[in-house]
Amino acid sequence: MTNNPWLSQVATVESVTQEIDSVATYQLRLDDPRAAQRYRFQPGQFNMLYLPSCGEAAISHSGPPSHDGNRFLHTIRFVGRVTDSIAKLQAGDQIGVRGPFGSAWPMRQCVGQDVVIVTGGLGLAPLRPAIYHLLQGRVDYRRVILLYGARSPGLLLYRREMESWQQSGLEVHLTVDRADIDWDGAVGIVPLLLDRLEGLRPDQTQVLTCGPEVMMHYAALAAVRLGVPKSAIWLSVERNMQCAFGMCGHCQLGPVFVCRDGPVFRYDQVHQLLKVRDL
Amino acid sequence: MSTLPKLAVAKFASCDGCQLTLLHAEDELLAIADAVHIANFAEASSRLEPAPYDITLVEGSITTQKDRRRIVKLRSDSKYLITIGACATAGGIQALRNFADHQDFLRAVYARPDYIQSLATSTPIAAHVKVDFELRGCPIDKSQLLEVIASLLAGHRPRTSSECVCQPCKRRGTVCVVVANNQPCLGPVTQAGCGAVCPAFDRGCYGCFGPAAQPNMLGLSDRLLQPRMDRAQSARFLQTFNSYAPEFSAAGQRLWQLAGQPKPLHPSLASSPGDTHPAAVGQGKETTEE
Amino acid sequence: MPAKDPTRCHVNATELPVIDHSPTPAQWFLPRQSLQTLLDQLQRLGYEVVGPRIDQAAIVYDQIESVDELPAGWTDLQSPGQYRLQPRADDALFGYVVGPHSWKKYLFPPLVNLMRSTKTTDGWQMQDEPQEPRRYALLGVRACELAAIAIQDRVFLSERYTDPLYQQRRHALLIIAVNCTQAASTCFCTSMQSGPRCTSGFDLALTELPTGFVVEIGSPGGQAVADDLPLRPATEQERESSSLARKTAFDQITRQLDTTNIRDKLMTRLEHPRWADVASRCLSCANCTLVCPTCFCHSVDDVTDLTSDEVIRQRHWDSCFNMDFSYANGGAVRDNVRSRYRQWLTHKLASWIDQFGSSGCVGCGRCITWCPVGIDLTEEVAAICSEPST
């Protein structure tokens, strides 16, 4: 066995599901059966996905943490050099995988609490494993609420699953910046949904948020306004990552290595840092 | 008919040095010939096939009316157009005319200047047509060219580093010629890609790869160059192969102005050369994503 | 050969006093003409000896086989943005301070292959890139450089992840330190508590005298090497002379960096106007980070041939001064020189403490000397910290 943390393992794409425009979900399985069997991750963690001659990209897990048959899912937006090449992959193609890396959503702290998930756009993908986890052990939590927004209805992710999530006990509130003719949900930014949320017990609530930094900023402010302690607000930060284990230096945000100490942070640990421009 | 991607190499105002870089890739030439169909490369073969082309490498700058029309046609004939070298990406050494009287040059060089039909300016290809990717250098670097071709063949967007020359210079263990030898050097503001050759041979970088990302030209001019040479010398040092690259051009003009010998841009060019350089020239910068 | 040397004083390990924590470590004497014996001995033990030599108008670190290759009679004159070799009045072998290279290039090489992917008929095979084991003996490591190696150890040999190449080379490493007997104007190791005296982290430590070297043994590995050297106990006079020589270095250090509460001072002054001021001077060339003996930032790229069937992932030294270094989500997080200089300085002197439990600066002064425009971090820190926080 190697102890080289840089070494990727070969995985095969088992299926590709087109989600929305320029976003697809890839189901992967490590080629080495023993490695596949051993592979575990926690909601919030990420993998480094590698295409030889193209490069690596840090991509969050977006599937159930206890997925059947050691498969795992990544929902990927095609926005750059590596992901544009990933977009060309089909079932049966191979990809390199290193991981899982990083910190996880605080599933244990959520037990017995109201859980509010605040997210926008593709930010739902890194939170989906947490949703699966919460719904699987639904009785362990009080209210579980998803506040989710996108620029337009067509950009809302995983809509086909929303109904089954609701049946499993998830309160879903959707909002869009620009409604279309079929839209009968809310219009406006996501943090507003938090402001409108009724019956929340702020001292017994955990808020999990992921999305553009500015959205997370306002979501956190809204949660604090509601009385949720900063130490019960969690966010997932994105930075340039190359090694994924705190050695290459790229992802530094002041004293933290986002790849190793994050990507999931407690708000009180990073809110001062996130306020500084260009840190 | 070959099913390989069709490659063309086109020449505008230039010395052919960048095309020669491709020919000098002796070890890799056979691999290139296996991977692409070289359809039009006058420097290498007299068999010239007509358009369209999948990949077109363009060397040289636009200095004549005829070339102005030719590049537009070539662009429409090419799927992916890559400019190669300082002439194509910044106007080349011949862009010095952009800061001088073109007629003076003609009279100084040619016995019968009236036979010469050229524009008063030398401008980069991107000032005329959309460029998909640019490779800097005078001449270009062989490995960068091969990397870009390999990327395109593998279906990836190509990429080159945006770091400055100092970084590969230090990586190869070269002692800084500015600090240890008091030599002027453009390494800190010049884009890497050459392998930091010059400082390894004990001379300062002369900027043939053009400006690096966000170069501090004021800091360089006033704190690195001027303590070692006067203003006019500093201006000349900046204005060589990439004199018309926006940052070098502005810094050079400022130094000429300070030296009391203002050299304004030719009136047909915008006051800032940045205006004639479309910003959207691909350098494929991207390292992380989610 | 040393075994035939009649002056040789063979010492068994058991005869030596315990020296690790002794306030007055045992000191031995190696005559100058026997330094070659040490080099031969190291080569015999299978070490590649690297040490100081003159190249490109500077004293750099490179492979050394003979004492003749050492920079005898040369010293370096350093000031912000300037380095000059100067002849010395004597023929001291280690009569210089520190140069443009640091030892990190041997443990954390500027360019190294990490893994290899090969396209086969069965698809991609991804494998470790085998690393040739290297056994380096570093000759002439200064106190600040010992501190730098200890700092990089904490980066590359953390509890959870280790860099295999660094680990192999570090474990095989033999360090022969040499105490400074002079300082440059750019030195400030006394401020960083990292010198000029070598106190730990070495196998052998030498202090150069005109006639030879006062030797201290710092480890069992050093002891094993010393066992076969023509050492004799240092005389009282030699000990005193060496102490005086070391004191000269100490007394010559004038540059200071006030580290009192520096972490909080810097992190509460992230909007100080001085950051913009230094950004107008800084060329963002990254020289400071590349000459720094502790800077560890790196990037990884793929290297391939035209067919892309054989792909190597290659690591190279990178720098937080590079704009693309922080590229994420369509743009650079640190999209200006101000934020990049701030990142470098606050990381080095402040956030490094959070990350690794110590400052990232050892006061070697390289970043001051090798800045082509002579920016002096001690001056910048003084300017930033002297005013109330913003």
Image (cartoon, rainbow, N blue to C red):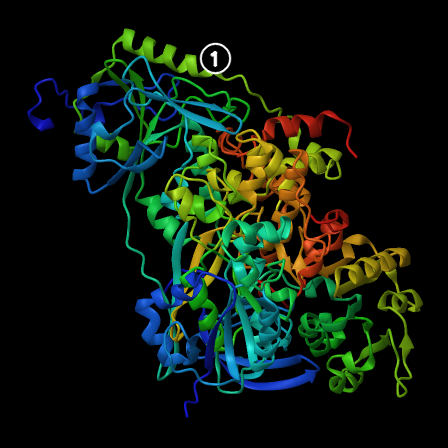
Q: Where residue A159 sits: x, y (%)?
A: 76, 84
The subunit letter for the residue under badge 1 reads: C
Task: Name the residue: 22% across, 32% down.
Answer: C225
Does residue C35 sit above or below B283 in this rendering?
A: above
- Give the residue number, with chain letter if any, for mark 1: C251
Name which residue type carries label 1. Asp
Looking at the image, can residue C100 be seen?
yes
Q: Where residue C204 sits: x, y (%)?
A: 30, 28
Helix, strand or loop for disc 1: helix
Q: Horizontally, is A196 left or right of C323 in the view?
A: right
Q: Horizontally, is C75 left or right of C236 in the view?
A: right
Between A206 and A251, the residue placed more toward the observer is A251
Q: Residue furthest top?
A: C237
Q: Quadrant of the N terminus of chain C?
A: top left
Q: Where residue C332 sits: x, y (%)?
A: 65, 56
Residue B174: name its quadrant: top left
